[in-house]
Amino acid sequence: MSIITNINKLFDHRIRLGIMSVLMVNEFADFNMLKELLGATDGNLASHTKALEKADYILVEKQFIGRKPNTRYSVTKLGKAEFKKHIEALEKLIHKT
Amino acid sequence: MSNKDYLKDISEIKNLMNKSSRFISLSGLSGILAGIYALIGAALTYYLVTTYSYGTLILDGWVFRTVMLILFLVAFFSATTGIFLTTRKAKKNDEKIWDNSSKRLLFNFLIPLIAGGLYILIILSQGKYGQTGGLMLIFYGLALINASKYSIGDIKYLGFIQIILGLIAALYPGFGFWLWVIGFGIMHIVYGTWMHFKYDVK
């Protein structure tokens, strides 16, 4: 089944899906914003952003605001395309069955 | 995963996209009150102009200055009521009042509004005040449409209505005052009521 192959294993988690959703509609988001929106713990969120970063789906930029370190995330072209495919596959699955 | 889980995924995605990019805690009640302030202001203005100014507005009389003051007060009270009620609603929704989404909303709302406000002041100072009512409606409508991308999408319809009223006012400057009353007074009340029952009463 070709539809099943479009379901991306990397997105098969609530937090990862959440990170991608937020980044799709925002130019960028910082760590705290994601944390608040998703209701995730620091460690949990960090491990999921790392996984998405490794796949080149999101871009991580570390910078300083004053003295405070700040990490901000944005979605890459690849991430955008993969996410779209994933959503389309989800929709098809729902309509088919 | 079952079908139900996928559906839940999709609705969660939609929810997060909205929550992270749109500020939705705008209060419908503040729209109603803004409309009432506008009507009170318009009634005072009407009374002043018809009793002391023989129905016409002379640009540098006290009546004109009082009318400007009334206009300012209407805008001021509308803004403070809006901020107060929106803060209250945001608290209830567990949404932050001053985050990226509300900043973006305010910024995009203010661009056409400030540009229009300055433009109106400039042409007023040149003595061309026949178009003021129409211009206020048009720029306010543009501000609403611009803001609708960052808030409840429905406010763009109010924006379209204001622009249409503004264009009619430009065509018939004699009705400028009454169109202003419809746009800022009555439409706010109608729209605020609709928003109140659609989003606030659950």
Image (tube, coloured by chain):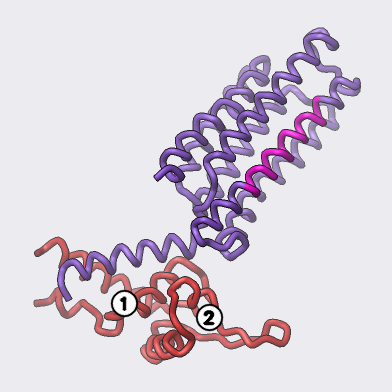
Q: Amino acid at mark 1?
A: Glu
User: On the rendered structure, is B79 left or right of B191?
Assistant: right
Q: Residue at x 67, y 20 (%)?
A: B177
Tags 1 and 2 in contact by the CB under 8 Å rule? no
Residue B80 part of the magenta-drawn span: yes
Q: Chain of mark 1?
A: A
Q: What chain is colored purple?
A: B
Decide which of B11, B133 is in the foreground and name it.
Answer: B11
Residue beneath the point at 58% across and 55% down: B105
Looking at the image, which residue is at 63% across and 17% down?
B172
Residue A17 screen position, x and y as percent: 34, 75
Q: Which residue is mark 1?
A: A82
Q: The numbered mark 2 sits on a residue in which chain?
A: A
| Marker disc for residue A17 | none
Q: Residue furthest right?
A: B61
Rendered residue at 45%/47% (across/down): B153
Q: The C terminus of chain A appears in which quarter of the rendering?
A: bottom left
Q: Nearer the viewer, residue B174 or B96?
A: B96
Quadrant hosting residue B30: top right
In the image, which disc is placed on residue A31?
A: 2
Q: Is residue B111 above or below residue B50?
A: below
Magenta-colored span: B67-84
Query: Could you tell me residue B2's position as x and y percent?
Result: 15, 72
Q: Count every numbered label the image shows and give the total.
A: 2
Q: Quadrant of the N terminus of chain A?
A: bottom left
Mark 2 surroundings: few (<14), some (14-19) or many (≥20) residues within 10 A = some
Q: CA distance from mark 1 to mark 2?
A: 22 Å
Q: Is residue A67 above or below residue B120?
A: below
Chain letter corresponding to the colour red: A
